[in-house]
Image (cartoon, rainbow, N blue to C red):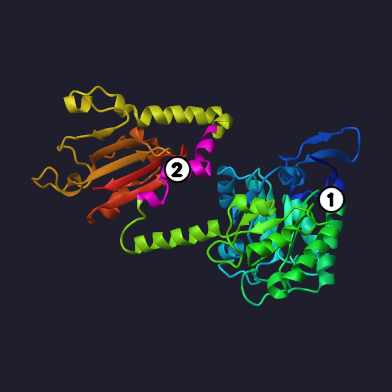
Amino acid sequence: MMSCSATVGRAGATATAGGGCVPHLHHFRTSFSSPFQLQSHRNSKPLRATITISCSSNKAKQLREILDSPGVHQGPACFDALSANLVQSAGFPLCFTSGFSISASRLGLPDTGYLSYGEIFDQGLLITQSVDIPVIGDADNGYGNAMNVKRTVKGYVNAGFAGIILEDQVSPKACGHTQGRKVVSREEAVMRIKAAVDARNESGSDIVIVARTDARQALSLDEALYRSRAFADAGADVVFIDALASRQEMEAFCQVSPLVPKMANMLEGGGKTPILTPLELEDIGYKIVAYPLSLIGVSIRAMQDALTAIKGGRIPPPGSMPTFEEIKDTLGFNAYYEEEKRYATSTDQLLSKRESSSVYSIQQREQVDTEQTSQTIEDPIVEVITPDVYNKYGADGSRDPFSGIWSRTLRIKITGRDGVEKLDLRIPAGFLDGITNTVPALGGVNLKKLLDDATDEIGGKLLDFNDRMGDRIQVFLE
């Protein structure tokens, strides 16, 4: 935790943060909600506030502990908050962001320099806020010269990143495993890392600086090894040569600056670097390993397969996708419902009881028919038969007692927010009196107007909405 102090005046707020952890001013215009904790001093003018902010320092500390621990540590690359959550749920200790994947998912464009600092910062902020594990952010070439690199590092600190990867490519940069890679001069490359170290010190953070060189493909292996050594001397915490072409080259790299951790990049699907197992990477001398394309790659293929099925008049087979209940659980619906109960008001509880008793009381009526008696609350199918002598809606004097609208049926179906069917009720379409006593959620709905509009239609759905309790209400004309 880092301690920051803020001065709040009547017209707004200004903030100074010890160690460069600068909170956004819009937080001060609210009620000092989490993650800020406010302690006011009533006797001082203007109001002085002591604020404790959870910045990236804790995550950086976690990452440094991982780097200090034995073994090699895997980190799949995410591209949004959902994929980051899945990485965390799978039990990985850390996560990378992939500029390649973010460019693909956010812009639908190749990783050839289209992605801007603002776009990747915004995406990174959503990612770091969604998980508790440390995230190492892809920062491309720092988006400019050494001064831009400093701004980028400080921005990544405030975004909550535990680490930042900076490379020595020229602008526009591109994926290191694609053609035409070019790098800046050796001197400029080292200056970028020095600027990053200065920015870290100035911000008072402990963000892990991962220095990457693309000189292997742009120039030579010897130049890449030289730059890696120079980056370590300049203060980089981890060094990384992208697109090494053989196991022998990987072994040579791990001999450089042996006390500085090495990062490997296992680009799936046919990159320039051979794919090795974690044990093999550990034996060579690597400490952390990224898997940049696994999540975006399988996502692309899965979406293509699903679209092919839909276009062919089918839906994706059950084995190719989770059930709706599994999707809801993954996204946190069940946890949300449980937490929501903590903040239910007395009015909410009263309405819930009234709706529950009135909507579903029909299930508790004494049944005479043996088959109806055997029905359970878990399988509520109710048929209501109304005498055919009463037809105040659409009566036409025909001898057929079920002529006109009386020959049609209204089906009212209620499905709980947990997916469980609560009610399946059928009534003659002409019998509308008292329906809101059974289903209060239909109060205020002009069913007669809907029937007028649908009288001559073959049938279909008249209504489909969620009530205030989250239940799905559907009305069909049969």
Residue under circle 1?
A: 20
Image x and y of residue 393, in percent: 23, 44
Q: Which residue lies furthest to the bottom in this view?
A: 180
Quarter of the image where the N terminus is located: top right
Image x and y of residue 294, in percent: 54, 57
**Amino acid at dot 1:** Gly
**Amino acid at dot 2:** Glu
Residue 404's place in the image compared with 383, above or below, is below
Name the residue at 35% across, 30% down: 360
Whether residue 306 appears in this view of the structure is yes
Image x and y of residue 3, in percent: 83, 40
Whether residue 125 appears in this view of the structure is no
Q: Which region is colored magenta?
A: 318-338
The rendered magenta stretch, by its main secondary structure, is classed as helix
Name the residue at 80% across, 48% down: 206
User: Pointer 2: residues within 10 angstroms few (<14), some, or many (20+)?
Assistant: few
Name the residue at 87% across, 53% down: 202
Name the residue at 82% across, 34% down: 39
